[in-house]
Image (spheres, grey):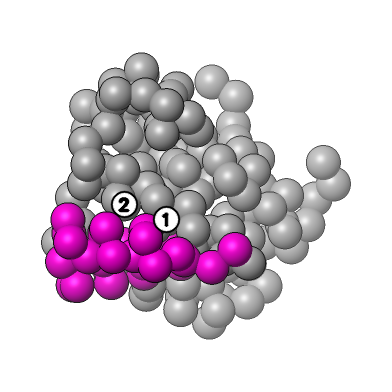
Amino acid sequence: MEKRITIPVTEPAGYKAILGLEKYIESTSLTPVHKNLIKIRASQINGCAFCIDMHTKEARAIGETEQRIYALNAWRETPFFTDEERAVLAIAEEVTLIQNHVSDKTYNNAITLLGDQYVAQVIMAAITINAWNRIGIATNLSPALG
C-alpha cells in the first residue's frame, strides 16, 4: 500500500479530539469484554485490518477465547455469547451499518437488558471505534507482521 498522511502528525488537534472520545470510553462502566466485542465487530464490518489486529490482541490479553474471537462475525449463529453481549453486538452493528438505522427491536431489547446509561455508552463506543476505523482505512494503516 502506498504511504499516506499520518493523522497525529498532519492534524494533531483532530487526533487529540478522537483520543478524548477514547478516554471517555475508557472511563465508562462498559466492561472490558464489551468494549473489545464492540471494537472487534465494528472493525470486522468496516474491514479495518489494523484495528482488528490491535483489538483481538487486546481481547486475548484480558482472557477472551480464540473460539469467541473467531466466531464473532457469526455471533448470532453461536451459543458463545450472553444475552447482554448479543444486545451490545446488535447495537454496535446497527450503529456501524447506520444506513439501515437502529431498529426499535434492537434498541428496546438493549434498553431492557442493559439500561439507558449503558446503552448510551455502547452507542458512544461504537461511534468511537467507527471513527478510528475510518482513520485507519483512509490512511492505509496496516498491522505489523508478527
Query: Residue drawn at (46%, 43%), measured in percent from left and top?
Result: 41
Q: In this view, does 125 lie to the left or right of 110?
A: right
Q: Is residue 117 magenta?
A: yes
Query: Which secondary structure lies at badge 2?
Result: helix
What residue is drawn where x is 37% and y is 24%? 78
Tell me if residue 25 can be seen: no
Quadrant of residue 37 within the rendered picture: top left
Which of 75/69 is in front?
A: 75
At 26% from the left and 43% from the top, the residue drawn is 85
Q: Is the residue marked by circle 1 packed among few (<14), some (14-19), or many (20+) residues within 10 Å?
A: many
Residue 78, relative to residue 125: is it above or below? above
Q: Which residue is located at x 27 percent, y 32 percent?
A: 81
Say the numbered circle drawn on residue 92. Answer: 1
Which corner quadrant holds the N terminus? top right
Image location of residue 129, percent across then percent down: 47, 58
Residue 24, percent from left and from top: 28, 71
Q: In this view, does 76 lie above or below 79?
A: below
Could you tell me which quadrant the C terminus lies in? top right
x, y percent for residue 110: 26, 59
Residue 77, compared with residue 44, is above or below; it is: above
Type of the residue with mark 2: Val
Horizontal side, residue 55 vs residue 34: left or right: right
Q: Can residue 52 be seen in this view?
A: yes
- The furthest residue to the right: 2
> Which picture quadrant has residue 86?
top left
Judging by the rendered image, the residue that carries numbered circle 2 is 88
Majority secondary structure of magenta residues: helix
| Cβ atoms at labels 2 and 1 below 8 Å apart | yes
Residues rendered magenta in the picture: 100-127
Q: Residues within 10 Å of mark 2 (few under 14, many from 20)?
A: many
Task: Give SS at disc 1.
Answer: helix
Q: In this view, does 46 lie above or below 117?
A: above
